[in-house]
């Protein structure tokens, strides 16, 4: 698996839950944006910006050229800025770093150096009746690092990922939003192994899991989610609406 600061998607979808509290008594969407229409309330009442920070752990199996397989573990942290042009649409961009982790092959373990990550994403809420909600997510991410094995020169490692997903959940007690999530993804990995340039990708191109977003205050939200099936991942984050 490529580092998904993303998120993949985990972070993109998580941020979608971190935006803002309910506005008056109109209910709340999964992204935290008021479900009231703009004809009912002035546009200025609705938050338009969100800043967020997230952490991600991922574990997956990769397949490279020449039937070369590797087990990969990565850690990443991401800072994200989101803009809400409408009550249903969230546009986001993030920068961060992947750090730690390893590639485990038959001939030994290759350690990852820290490296930059970047994310562009969009989330859309097509349905919200004040209790149940549906969110569609999309994220494009990039990560770069170097791998190190004892006694060998370091090699470059770059990964690209496009991730599409959906979340379905329920609003409980005005502050809790549990949800189930499914995502599909794909993208190439570029690496040098034994002085040869090779490409790879995940053996699993999906994630299935669940999460919970909690509104702490009118502006502060936190979330956590886990994906035990497909690409395995755990993500946690905090967001602040401006």
Image: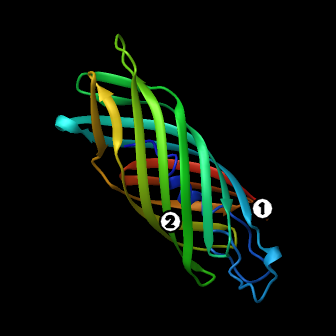
Q: Residue at x 71, y 77 (%)?
A: 34
Please give the residue where the numbered disc 2 appears in the rendered image: 137
Q: Which mark is residue 47?
A: none
Q: Residue at x 17, y 35 (%)?
A: 66
Q: Position of residue 191 (x, y in %)?
A: 34, 32
Please give the residue where the numbered disc 1 appears in the rendered image: 219
Query: The C terminus appears in which quarter of the rendering?
Result: bottom right
Q: Position of residue 5 (x, y in %)?
A: 52, 46
**Residue 157 position by quadrant:** top left
> How dense is the environment of label 1, judged by Cα within 10 Å: few (below 14), some, or many (20 and up)?
some
Residue 30 in view, yes or no: no
Q: Residue at x 34, y 14 (%)?
A: 152
Q: Nearer the viewer, mark 2 or mark 1?
A: 2
Q: Position of residue 68 (x, y in %)?
A: 21, 34
Looking at the image, residue 48 sits to the left or right of residue 111; the answer is: right
Work out whether residue 101 or residue 87 is closer to the camera in this orientation and state it.
87
- 144 w.r.t. 31: above or below: above
Looking at the image, residue 98 sits to the left or right of residue 171; the answer is: left
């Amino acid at each position: 698996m490529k580092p998904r600061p993303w998120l993949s998607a985990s972070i993109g979808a998580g941020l979608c839950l971190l935006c803002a509290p309910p506005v008056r008594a109109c209910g709340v969407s999964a992204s935290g944006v008021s479900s009231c229409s703009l004809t009912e309330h002035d546009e200025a009442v609705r938050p338009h910006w969100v800043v967020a920070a997230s952490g991600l752990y991922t574990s997956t199996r990769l397949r490279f050229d020449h039937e070369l397989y590797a087990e990969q573990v990565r850690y990443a942290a991401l800072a994200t800025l989101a803009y809400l042009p409408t009550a249903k649409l969230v546009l986001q961009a993030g920068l961060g770093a992947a750090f730690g982790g390893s590639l485990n092959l038959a001939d030994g373990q290759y350690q990852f150096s820290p490296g930059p990550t970047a994310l562009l994403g969009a989330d859309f809420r097509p349905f919200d009746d004040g209790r149940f909600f549906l969110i569609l997510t999309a994220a494009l991410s990039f990560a770069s690092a170097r791998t190190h094995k004892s006694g060998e020169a370091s090699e470059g490692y770059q990964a690209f990922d496009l991730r599409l997903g959906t979340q379905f959940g329920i609003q409980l007690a005005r502050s809790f939003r549990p949800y189930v999530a499914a995502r599909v993804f794909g993208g190439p990995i570029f690496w040098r192994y034994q002085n040869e340039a090779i490409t790879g990708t995940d053996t699993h191109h999906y994630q299935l899991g669940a999460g919970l977003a909690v509104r702490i205050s009118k502006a502060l939200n936190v979330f956590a989610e886990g994906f035990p099936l497909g690409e395995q991942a755990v993500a946690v984050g905090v967001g602040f609406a401006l």
